[in-house]
C-alpha cells in the first residue's frame, strides 16, 4: 500500500465522520488504519480527529466513536497509546450531550464513550493484548503464569465483556426507534469481533487456571460469571444473526448452547493410554528351557563335530526347499485373502452408500424440522427483542422523567443563582458606572487642565518665537557691533602704527638731543683745555714776555670775545627751550596716545560685555529650545521602546494562543534565516542605541527608531515561524521545548528592551 498523506487522511476522516445518518464507509476507516501502519504513528490521526467539529452534531460524534473504535482495534499499536494520552479529550465528547439529544444519540454516545475509555484503560494495564483481542496461546499462558495476576486479568476481561453486553443491549434497544438504523447497527461490528476475542481468551485462560489451581472452589465465581456471559453472548450473536444488514458486513460467530467445559485441555484430546508390558507365558519359558543346550550336550556336540559338518549341507538344502514351499503357500494364501478383502470392501461401500442415502433423507427431514424450529425461535427472539425494546423504552421514559425533574431542579437552582448573580452584577455594574463617571470627570478635568496647559504653552511658544526674533535682531545688531569692533580694531592698528612712528620720531629727537648735549660738553672741555693752555701761555708769556703783555692781553681778550661769541652761537643752537619744546610735544603725543588707547580699551570692553550678554541670551534661548526638542525626542524614543515591548508581548501571547497556528508554510531553513536576520538587527539596534547615548544631543534618532522597529518585528516573525514548524516535529515534547525556548527568548528580549528603556530615561 502506498503511504497516505495528511491531506488524504483529513479527507477520509471528514467522509467517515460526516453528518449523514449512515454507517461509516469501510474504505475510509480502512484508509485511516493503513495510515497508522504506514507512518508507524497515530499522532496525526488523533490531531486531525480533534480538529473536526464533533461537538456540534450527535451523528458526527457517534460516527467518530465508531471510527475511533475500529482504528484502535486494527490500527498500529501506537494508536492505543495515543488514545490513552487523549483520554481527557475522548471523555469530553460524552459531556457535550448530557441528555438524549435531539436525535436520541446522547445516551448511546455516553455509553460508547465510556466503553472506549474502559478499553483504553484495560490495554494500558495489560500491554500483551492487541486491539481486536486476537487469540494467541502464548499471551494466554503468560497472563496466567502468575495465579494472582491471572485471576485479576480474568476479572478485567469479564468486566470488559459486561461493558460490551451493556452497550449492545442499549444499541438493540435503540434500533427499532430509528428510521435509518444503519448508523447504529454499524457500531455492532467492532463489538462482535472484540467480544468473540475476549470469549476465546477467557476460555483458554480459565482452562489454564483450572489445570494449575489447587482447589476448584476458588475459581467457581469466575466460572459462574463466565457461564452467565456465555448465555448472554449466545443471545447477542443470535440477535445479530437476525439482522440482514449486519450479516452482510461481518460473519457472526456461532456458539454452542451450553458453555464449554473448562476442566479439559484446549485441544480436547484425551491422554494416550499407556501400553502394558507383555509377560512371557509359562509355555514360552519351558520352550526356552528346552531349546537351551545343557553342558553334556555341548560336550557331545564337540566330539561329534565332524559328523555334524557332513550332514549340515544336506540339512540346509532340505530347509531351503521347505522354505520355498512355505513361501509359495503364503503367497497363495495372501492372494486369497486379498480377493476376500476386495469382496468385503465392495460390500462395505454398498452398505455405506445405502446408509448415506438414508442419512441424507433423515438430514433433510431434520433440516425441515430445524428450519421450523429456527423460525419459531426467531419469532420468540423477535418477541423478546420487542419486549426488551418496550422495557428499554420504559426505562428511558423513567430516566427521562428523572432527568426532567433533575433538570427542572437544576434550572430552578440556576435561575436563583442567575438572579443572585444578576443582582450582584447590577450592583457591580453600578459601582463600575460610578467609578467610570468619576474617571470621566477626572479625565475631563485633566483634559481641561491639559487644554489650558496647551494654550499656555502655545502662548509661551509664540512669546518665545517673538523673543527668538528679537534675539535674532540682537544677534544682527551684535554682528554690526562686531563689524564696528573690527573697524575700530583696524583704526586702532592704524593708530598703533602712527604711534609707533611718533615713538620713532621721539627716539630720534632724544638721540639728537643726547648727541647735541654730548657735542656741547666736548666743546666746553676743549675750550677749557684751550683756556688752560692760554693761561699757561699767558703765564709763560708774563714770565717770559712781560714786554708784550698788553698786546698779548689784548689779543687774548679778542680771542676771548671770539670764543664767547662762538659759544653764544653754539648755545643758541642748543637752546634748552627748544629741547623743552620738543619734550613737551613728545609728552603731548604720549598723553594723546594714552587717551586714545584708554578710549579704545573702554569701547572694546563695552562691546565685549554687550556681546557676552547677547550671546548668553541667545544661548539660553537656544538651550531651552534644544532641551524641549530633546525632551520630545526622548519621549518619542521611550514610546517606541514601549511599543516594541508591547509588540514582543503580543507575539508571545499569539505563541501561546491555540487560535494562532503560526506560519504553516514555514520551514527550518527559513526559520534559521529569520533568526540570523534578527541577530544582525539586534546588533544594529545595540550599536545605534550605544552611539545615540554616547553622542548625547547630537545622536542620530532616526537610526535608533528604525532599528527598534525592525528588531521587534523580526522577533514576532521568529515566534510566528517557530510555532509554524512545530507541525513538523514527531514528538510533542520536542514541540513543547521549541515553544518554551521561543517564549524564553522573547521574554528575555522584552526584558532587554525594558532595560534599554530604563537606562535611557535618566539620560
Image (cartoon, rainbow, N blue to C red):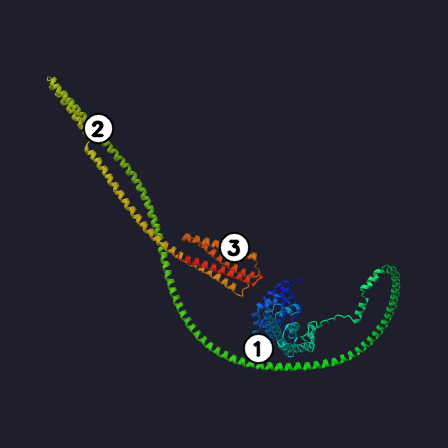
Q: Nearer the viewer, residue 534 or 116?
A: 116
Q: Nearer the viewer, residue 389 or 685?
A: 389
Q: Is residue 711 above or below residue 10?
A: above
Q: Which badge, 3 or 2, is on the more N-terminal residue? A: 2
Q: Residues within 10 Å of mark 1 (few under 14, many from 20)?
A: some
Location of the N terminus (image quadrant): bottom right
Residue at image mark 2:
519
Q: Is residue 499 above or below residue 567?
A: below
Q: Would residue 279 appear left or right of 220 to someone viewing this image?
A: right
What label sits on residue 99 in the rendered view? 1
Q: Would residue 353 appear left or right of 256 to someone viewing this image?
A: right
Residue 285 percent across, percent down from the top left: 79, 69
Q: Can residue 620 be seen in this snapshot?
A: yes
Q: Nearer the viewer, residue 250 or 185?
A: 250
Q: Which badge, 3 or 1, is on the more N-terminal residue? A: 1
Residue 636 percent across, percent down from the top left: 43, 58
Residue 744 percent across, percent down from the top left: 49, 60
Q: Secondary structure at mark 2?
A: helix
Quick check: marks 3 and 2 in contact, CB under 8 Å? no
At 29% across and 46% down in the image, what residue appears? 603
Which quadrant of the view contains residue 562? top left
Q: CA distance from mark 3 to mark 1?
A: 56 Å
Q: Which badge, 2 or 1, is on the more N-terminal residue? A: 1
Q: Residues within 10 Å of mark 2 (few under 14, many from 20)?
A: some
Q: CA distance from mark 3 to mark 2?
A: 101 Å
- Nearer mark to the viewer, of 2 and 1: 1
Which quadrant of the view contains residue 557? top left
Residue at image mark 3:
677
Which quadrant of the view contains residue 600? top left
- Nearer mark to the viewer, of 3 and 1: 1
Q: Secondary structure at mark 1?
A: loop
Amino acid at each position: 500500500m502506498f503511504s497516505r498523506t495528511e491531506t488524504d487522511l483529513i479527507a477520509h476522516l471528514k467522509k467517515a465522520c460526516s453528518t449523514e445518518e449512515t454507517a461509516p464507509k469501510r474504505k475510509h476507516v480502512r484508509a485511516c488504519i493503513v495510515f497508522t501502519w504506514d507512518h508507524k504513528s497515530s499522532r496525526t490521526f488523533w490531531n486531525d480527529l480533534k480538529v473536526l467539529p464533533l461537538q456540534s452534531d450527535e451523528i458526527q460524534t457517534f460516527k467518530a466513536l465508531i471510527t475511533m473504535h475500529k482504528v484502535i482495534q486494527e490500527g498500529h499499536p501506537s494508536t492505543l497509546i495515543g488514545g490513552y494520552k487523549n483520554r481527557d479529550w475522548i471523555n469530553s465528547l460524552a459531556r457535550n450531550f448530557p441528555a438524549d439529544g435531539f436525535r436520541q444519540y446522547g445516551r448511546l454516545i455516553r455509553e460508547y464513550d465510556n466503553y472506549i475509555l474502559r478499553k483504553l484503560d484495560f490495554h494500558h494495564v495489560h500491554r500483551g493484548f492487541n486491539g481486536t483481542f486476537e487469540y494467541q496461546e502464548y499471551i494466554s499462558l503468560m497472563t496466567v503464569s502468575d495465579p494472582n495476576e491471572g485471576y485479576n486479568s480474568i476479572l478485567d476481561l469479564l468486566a470488559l465483556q459486561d461493558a460490551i453486553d451493556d452497550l449492545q443491549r442499549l444499541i438493540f434497544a435503540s434500533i427499532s426507534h430509528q428510521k435509518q438504523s444503519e448508523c447504529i447497527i454499524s457500531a455492532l461490528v467492532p463489538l462482535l469481533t472484540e467480544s468473540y476475542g475476549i470469549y476465546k481468551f477467557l476460555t483458554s485462560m480459565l482452562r489454564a487456571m483450572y489445570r494449575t489451581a489447587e482447589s476448584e472452589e476458588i475459581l467457581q465465581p469466575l466460572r459462574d460469571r463466565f457461564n452467565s456471559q456465555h448465555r448472554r453472548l449466545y443471545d447477542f450473536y443470535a440477535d445479530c444473526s437476525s439482522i440482514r444488514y449486519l450479516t452482510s458486513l461481518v460473519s457472526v460467530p456461532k456458539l454452542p448452547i451450553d458453555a464449554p467445559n473448562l476442566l479439559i485441555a484446549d485441544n480436547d484430546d484425551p491422554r494416550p493410554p499407556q501400553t502394558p508390558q507383555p509377560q512371557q507365558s509359562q509355555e514360552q519359558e519351558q520352550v526356552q528351557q528346552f531349546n537351551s543346550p545343557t553342558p553334556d550336550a555341548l560336550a557331545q556336540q564337540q566330539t561329534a563335530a565332524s559328523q555334524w559338518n557332513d550332514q549340515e549341507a544336506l540339512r540346509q538344502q532340505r530347509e531351503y526347499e521347505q522354505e520355498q514351499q512355505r513361501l509359495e503357500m503364503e503367497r497363495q494364501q495372501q492372494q486369497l485373502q486379498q480377493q476376500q478383502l476386495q469382496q468385503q470392501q465392495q460390500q462395505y461401500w454398498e452398505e455405506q452408500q445405502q446408509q448415506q442415502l438414508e442419512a441424507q433423507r433423515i438430514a433433510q427431514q431434520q433440516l425441515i424440522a430445524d428450519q421450523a424450529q429456527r423460525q419459531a425461535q426467531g419469532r420468540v427472539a423477535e418477541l423478546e427483542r420487542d419486549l426488551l425494546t418496550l422495557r428499554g423504552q420504559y426505562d428511558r421514559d423513567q430516566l427521562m422523567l428523572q432527568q426532567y425533574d433533575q433538570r427542572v431542579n437544576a434550572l430552578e437552582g440556576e435561575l436563583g443563582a442567575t438572579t443572585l448573580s444578576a443582582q450582584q452584577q447590577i450592583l457591580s455594574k453600578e459601582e463600575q458606572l460610578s467609578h467610570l463617571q468619576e474617571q470621566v470627570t477626572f479625565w475631563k478635568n485633566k483634559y481641561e487642565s491639559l487644554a489650558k496647559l496647551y494654550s499656555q504653552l502655545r502662548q509661551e511658544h509664540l512669546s518665545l518665537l517673538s523673543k527668538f526674533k528679537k534675539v535674532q535682531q540682537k544677534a544682527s545688531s551684535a554682528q554690526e557691533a562686531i563689524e564696528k569692533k573690527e573697524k575700530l580694531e583696524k583704526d586702532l592698528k592704524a593708530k598703533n602704527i602712527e604711534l609707533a612712528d611718533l615713538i620713532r620720531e621721539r627716539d630720534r629727537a632724544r638721540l639728537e638731543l643726547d648727541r647735541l648735549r654730548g657735542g656741547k660738553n666736548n666743546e666746553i672741555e676743549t675750550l677749557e683745555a684751550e683756556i688752560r693752555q692760554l693761561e699757561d701761555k699767558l703765564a709763560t708769556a708774563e714770565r717770559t714776555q712781560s714786554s708784550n703783555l698788553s698786546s698779548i692781553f689784548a689779543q687774548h681778550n679778542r680771542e676771548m670775545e671770539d670764543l664767547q661769541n662762538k659759544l653764544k652761537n653754539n648755545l643758541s643752537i642748543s637752546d634748552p627751550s627748544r629741547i623743552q619744546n620738543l619734550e613737551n610735544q613728545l609728552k603731548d603725543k604720549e598723553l594723546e596716545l594714552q587717551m586714545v588707547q584708554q578710549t579704545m580699551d573702554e569701547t572694546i570692553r563695552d562691546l565685549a560685555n554687550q556681546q557676552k550678554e547677547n550671546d548668553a541670551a541667545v544661548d539660553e534661548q537656544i538651550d531651552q529650545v534644544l532641551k524641549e526638542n530633546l525632551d520630545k525626542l526622548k519621549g518619542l524614543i521611550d514610546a517606541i521602546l514601549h511599543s516594541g515591548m508591547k509588540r514582543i508581548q503580543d507575539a508571545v501571547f499569539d505563541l501561546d494562543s491555540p487560535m494562532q497556528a503560526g506560519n504553516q508554510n514555514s520551514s527550518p531553513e527559513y526559520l534559521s534565516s529569520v533568526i540570523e536576520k534578527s541577530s544582525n538587527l539586534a546588533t544594529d539596534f545595540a550599536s545605534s542605541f550605544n552611539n545615540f547615548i554616547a553622542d548625547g544631543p547630537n545622536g542620530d534618532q532616526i537610526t535608533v527608531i528604525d532599528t527598534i522597529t525592525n528588531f521587534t518585528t523580526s522577533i514576532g516573525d521568529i515566534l510566528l515561524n517557530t510555532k509554524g514548524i512545530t507541525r513538523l516535529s514527531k514528538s510533542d515534547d520536542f514541540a513543547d521545548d521549541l515553544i518554551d525556548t521561543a517564549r524564553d527568548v522573547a521574554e528575555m528580549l522584552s526584558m532587554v528592551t525594558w532595560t534599554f528603556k530604563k537606562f535611557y530615561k535618566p539620560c
